[in-house]
Amino acid sequence: MARKTVTIIKRQGHREKYDEHKVYGSVYAACLAAGESEATAEKISATVAKKLSHSITDWKVTNSDQIFRQVIVELGKLSPKAVFLYEMHRDLS
């Protein structure tokens, strides 16, 4: 069965397809910045990205804020110190 495409409405209003790799990359960067080892950052990033991808499988359209909030919840369970850096990166970008 083909995987359903989820459309993300970004903060500036444009749309793009959900990409699990983007979630993984942003979580990985936050984990490294928070002092997690590369191995731990990889495990946390993979877990968060997979959980998020699984939770949105029934969605057709969502916005980046909803994705952001879900990442914060999942990341907070695995690396609370990385949550602050993940949030700050968004504020700066």
Image (spheres, grey):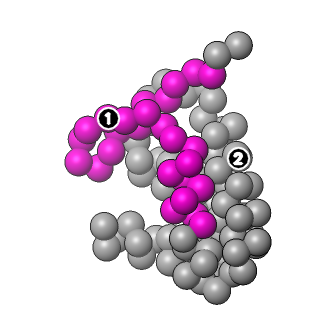
Q: CA distance from mark 1 to mark 2?
A: 22 Å
- Residue 68 location in percent, x, y? 49, 55
Kind of element beneath mark 1: strand
On screen, residue 77 versus residue 26, left or right, reads right
Seen in the picture, residue 30 relative to 47 is either above or below; the reply is below
Numbered circle sitting on residue 51: 2
Q: Quadrant of the N terminus?
A: top right
Q: Can residue 77 be seen at all in this image of the molecule?
A: no
Residue in view at x 62 percent, y 74 percent:
31
Determine crowd level at label 2: few under 14, some 14-19, many 20+ residues with C-alpha closer than 10 A.
some
Please tell me which residue lies in front, 73 or 49: 49
Q: Is residue 12 a member of the stretch shown in magenta?
A: yes
Span highlighted in magenta in the image: 3-28
Q: Can residue 89 be seen at all in this image of the molecule?
A: yes
Q: Quadrant of the C terminus?
A: bottom left
Q: Mark 2: which amino acid? A: Lys
Seen in the picture, residue 70 relative to 9 is either above or below; the reply is below
Provide the residue designation for mark 1.
15
Residue in view at x 64 percent, y 16 percent:
2
On screen, residue 56 versus residue 50, left or right, reads left
Residue in view at x 60 percent, y 78 percent:
32
- Residue 56 location in percent, x, y? 60, 35
The answer to which image quadrant residue 59 occupies is top right
Q: Which residue is farthest top?
A: 1
Seen in the picture, residue 71 relative to 1 is either above or below; the reply is below
Kind of element beneath mark 2: helix
